[in-house]
Image (cartoon, rainbow, N blue to C red):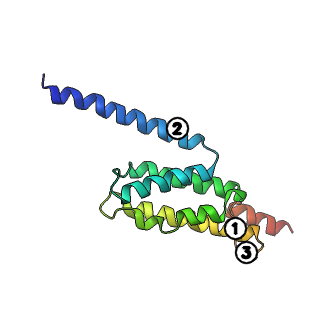
Amino acid sequence: MNPQVGSVVPCVRLQEACKAAIQFSVQREQDAGLLIQMLTGRLKLGSKGEDKIADVGIMIRVAQRATSLIKLDPNQASDALLEALENSEELVPPDVNEARDMQAVLEELQEVIRKSISIRNGEVEEDQEEPGQPECEVEEQTQQT
């Protein structure tokens, strides 16, 4: 048996187990700020060359989870989170698979945070949808009044 081949299989299994554990933890996390901190930290390490960028698919899920949490609870949005995400899409190396997807998800997250902050500050226009409410519920409420 080739010793190199034998060592690759456990390494792949370990990577898969780590990915599964991270994905499970991300889905259970309720603090958008913590997810954003984890996400931006990994992006900064990757952009400085200090560490290889993590699995982009996992990072996309982290950003999507943070977006969902802020849509459900706009009070989690803050200027500090927006500042932490500032220029984050520029930190995604262009040569990484799914780089465009990652950049798009980061932009969406920033927009959801901006809208949530605007709503909280009373700066939202009347025809805009609130982040915590799906569009169909907004239309139903309008028809009932």
Going from N to C along the chain, the mark reached first, 2 or 1, is 2
Residue at the spot of label 2: 24
Residue 129 visible from this viewpoint: no
Q: Is residue 7 above or below residue 63?
A: above
| Label drawn at residue 31 | none
Q: Residues within 10 Å of mark 1 (few under 14, many from 20)?
A: many
Asked if the residues shown at circle 2 and circle 1 are in contact, with their CB atoms under 8 angstroms apart, the answer is no
Question: Where is the N terminus found, in terms of image quarters?
Answer: top left
Residue that badge 1 annotates: 117
Q: Type of residue at label 2? A: Phe
For residue 124, the mark is: 3
Name the amino acid type tagged 3.
Val
Q: Give x and y (percent) for residue 78.
A: 66, 62
Q: Secondary structure beneath disc 3?
A: loop
Total number of numbered discs in the rendering: 3
Circle 1 SS class? helix
- Sort mark 3 into few (<14), some (14-19) or many (20+) by Cα contacts within 10 Å: some
Q: In the rendered image, which quarter is residue 127 located in?
A: bottom right
**Residue 85, how many percent across, how many down?**
53, 63
Q: CA distance from mark 1 to mark 3?
A: 9 Å
Mark 3 to mark 2: distance in Å?
Answer: 35 Å
Quarter containing the C terminus:
bottom right
